[in-house]
Structure formats: structure tokens, C-alpha cells
Image (spheres, rainbow, N blue to C red):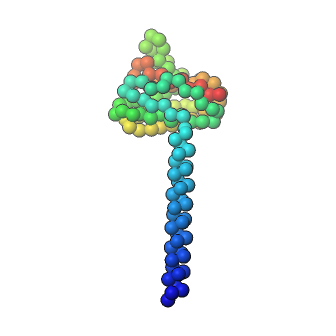
Amino acid sequence: MMKKSLVFLAVLSLLTMLIVACGEVSANSSSSTANTPTVHMNETQFEQTQITIKKGEHVTLVDDVAVVHIIQNGTWDNNGNARPEAEAGAPKVQLQFNGGDTNSIGPFNTTGTFHYYCTVHNGMNLTVIVK
């Protein structure tokens, strides 16, 4: 009887160690996504209008407010006119945010300068520079 109790205790200890070890791996993997280049959006603007990233990376867009944003390739010009256009090598983007959500653009596999804008908010431009 004592031998069965020791075996049960040993098996239970091993299972506990495996569960703890898996939890630590999961925590480390989630912190790696925290290192993804990120741009936040408020009611009418990108909080950072330009970001420089490395070739092969993604850019995470975060809508911090309960406002709709529709992000596409292109830019608003100085006269307030929308200029939809995708530069060669730019990831094609057609994203809708409804508030409090997150989406990713990329990967950016070509070096260069790429432009994105919100079709809803005049002047809301983002420039992504890939090195």
C-alpha cells in the first residue's frame, strides 16, 4: 500500500512539473509578440505617423478607442484628397477596425517606404519604412 502511494505521489509530481513547465513556455512565447512593432490609433489619427521596421517583420495596428477605422494602401494628400495606391512590394491591406481591436500588416518582405491611410478619417496617414 505504501509503495502504491509513493508511485502515485511521484506521478503526480511529474505531472505538476510538466504543467508548470508548459506555463512558462507559454508566457515566454506571448512576450515575443509584445516585441512586434506596434502603432496605436486614437479617434482620428495614428498616434505614431511613421515607423521603421526590419525586412520580414509585421506591424501591429491597435484601435484603442471605440471608433471605426478602415485601413488601406495609399495616403491622404495635402489637399485632403484620398490617394489609394499600393507601392511595389507593399503588403496589400484592407482592414476594418471597430474599436478595441488589433490587426497586423505584413510581412514586409521588400525594403522601401510604404503608405497606409484610414479611408474614414481625412489626414490619417501611416508611413512604414522597411530597412
The residue sitting at 36% across, 33% down in the picture is 65
Q: Position of residue 56 (x, y in %)?
A: 63, 36
Q: Give whichever of 25, 124 is nearer the camera.
A: 25
Q: Residue furthest left?
A: 66
Left/right of residue 110 with respect to residue 24 in the rendered view: right
Question: Looking at the picture, does residue 105 appear above or below residue 6?
Answer: above
The residue sitting at 55% across, 39% down in the picture is 35
Q: Give whichever of 39, 28 is nearer the camera.
A: 28
Q: Position of residue 17 (x, y in %)?
A: 54, 66
State the quadrant of the C terminus: top right
The residue sitting at 54% across, 80% down in the picture is 7
Left/right of residue 118 with respect to residue 113 in the rendered view: left
Q: Position of residue 18 (x, y in %)?
A: 54, 65
Q: Give whichever of 56, 4 is nearer the camera.
A: 4
Q: Give whichever of 78, 20 is nearer the camera.
A: 20
Question: Looking at the picture, does residue 123 appear above or below residue 58?
Answer: above
Q: Residue furthest top?
A: 79
Determine if residue 88 is in view: no
Q: Residue furthest bottom?
A: 1
Q: Position of residue 99 (x, y in %)?
A: 37, 35
* Image label count: 0
The residue sitting at 60% across, 33% down in the picture is 108
Determine if residue 18 is in view: yes
